[in-house]
Structure formats: C-alpha cells, structure tokens
Amino acid sequence: MCASSACGWQACLARGLAAFAVVVAATFSLPAVALELPRERAVAGGVALVELGPALVAPQASLDGVPVLVAGRPGGWTAVVGIPLEAAPGSLELELRAEDEPPRRLPVAVGPVRYAEQRLKVAPGKVDLSPVDLARHERERLRSAEIVATWSALDPGSLRMLQPVPGRRSGSFGLRRVFNDQPRKPHGGMDIAAPTGTPVVAAAAGRVIDTGDYFFNGNTVWIDHGRGLLTMYCHLSSIAVKAGDTVEAGARIGAVGATGRVTGPHLHWSVMLNRTMVDPALFLAGGG
C-alpha cells in the first residue's frame, strides 16, 4: 500500500510493476551457472555442456528418454550431459521442455576418441563363470540397473569433486579391457592404487543409496548426489556407511581393499550422469 492517501490505484500499480521489472532484470543479470561445472570433453564417456538460455523456471532436458541434470539460474541454464561410452562420433539429440514452450531438440556434437587397450590376467573363475556365479551376477546386474536409474530432487552441492583416496591412478577411464585374452566392456571408472586399509572418502556430499558385496565389484558403496549424478566406490576392504546415510564431502565411507575381480588392492571410482559412466577426471577439483 502507498504511504500517501493521495496516491491512486493506478500510481500504485505502476510503481509495483516498475519494482517487479527491477527484480526481473536483476534476476536475469545473475551468473548463468550457480555451480562450478565439470570440465567439458564432448566425446564418448565425456561430458557436454549445452547452454539452454534464460528462463524463470529451469527447463527439463533428457537424452534418449533419460533425465539430464540442468544447472544454473534464471539468467542462464546449462544441461550437463553424460555421453555414453558406446556413442559413435557424430551428434546426439537433447530433448528440451520449457514452461509455456513447445518441446524442442538441440544437437550435442560428439567428437572422436580412441581409448587404449589393457590386458589383464585374473583367476579363471572371474572370467568364465560357473552356473552359480552366473546366477549371482545376473541378480546383481538387475539390482545395479535399479540403482543406476536413481533420480532424486536433491541439489548437488557441487559438480566438482574430491579424489576419494590419495594415490597413483593405476588405470584410465575408457580402457578397452581384455581379461585372460577375452574382450570385455570398457573400463567405466578411475582406478587409484593404494594400500589395503587406506581410508576412502565421499567425493561430494550426498546420500548413500546402496552398499553390498558384488561378484565383480567386491564391497561397494553407491552415493546419490542429486538429479542423476551418482558415484560408485568398489573393491573396498570394509564399508563404514549404510544405505540411507547422509554424508558430507570428505566423509569416510570405507577403506581400500582387493575384493571382487582385481589384480591387487586399489579403489575403483565411477561417476555417473544420466545413467551413463563418465570420466571422473572431468569432475576433480583443480582440473583433475
């Protein structure tokens, strides 16, 4: 209400609209991205950053029907797109839905990349599975598919992460792996060599959504950081958290071990966006 009784309703309305215009202008002048984003590398297994422009409400983005994380502010939104390791060079289509606008599609260019090959020798039973182990692996595969599909409304506290354990990176993301002369899926994480028992910490704040002992991954912890951003920690000698726990970045979640299919003690660390494993090095604070 105006302070002066002489002020008519038209003047009040005009002043209100002017004040609203100032607020809107200030809102749209905010930085385009509220969070520090991962480094962009638009190749298979990498991350593409797609500018979506300004909007009062964040647009909804998806890739092949899978929701994609959107970060930013009304002044400018960015889709943070995980590119599948099996993606061929060319272009993917990002599906976009914004308030009061018809759906549209944006191209996501995917550049060429060639990952090295790694040959490993492990116990024969870890490659040619017995019927019992094969049945176990199938149960775990279905369970993992449910975990991978996690989508929560949590806001990631950061899109930059801590290296979960100090040590030498003994394996690179994307390696084409050959176990006992048999080709298998590319390596979907970062291996960090460290002695058994070395503390493993959460790379970023989030909620623990699964822990367990898996045939290939050994003792494993999954953390949900919000909006399809997940991390996985494998081959642990011990687990210090349980499903439902909330953890801060740097909180101890377990210890390095050699459980599952391994050639020695190390941490296998994976980062997932829109249900696809992407290179964890792109998320490391300080440039990886």
Image (tube, rainbow, N blue to C red):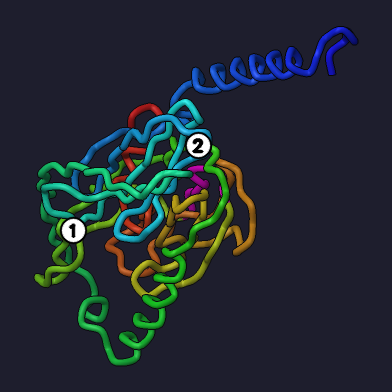
Q: Secondary structure at mark 2?
A: loop
Which labelled disc corresponds to residue 86?
1
Q: Is residue 51 above or below residue 145?
A: above
Neighbor class of circle 2 (other Cα within 10 Å; few <14, some 14-19, many 20+) is: some
Please state the horizontal and vertical placement of residue 105, each as a whole percent of the image. 28, 47
* Stretch in magenta: 197-206
Please state the horizontal and vertical placement of residue 235, each as a whole percent of the image. 40, 62
Which one is in front, 99 or 145?
A: 99
How would you classify the magenta stretch by its main secondary structure?
Answer: loop
Rendered-image quadrant of the N terminus:
top right
Q: Report the side of 94 relative to 221 (left or right).
A: left
Give the residue displayed 52% in from the left and 62% down from the top: 238
Q: Quadrant of residue 9?
A: top right
Q: Quadrant of residue 262?
A: bottom left
Distance of mark 2 from mark 1, alpha carbons? 27 Å
Amino acid found under the numbered disc labelled 2? Ser
Give the residue displayed 41% in from the left and 44% down from the top: 101
Please state the horizontal and vertical placement of residue 159, each as a whole percent of the image. 45, 38
Q: Is residue 270 visible?
A: no
Amino acid found under the numbered disc labelled 1? Glu
Q: Is residue 34 above or below residue 237?
A: above
Q: Which residue is mark 2?
A: 158
Q: Is 203 a magenta residue? A: yes
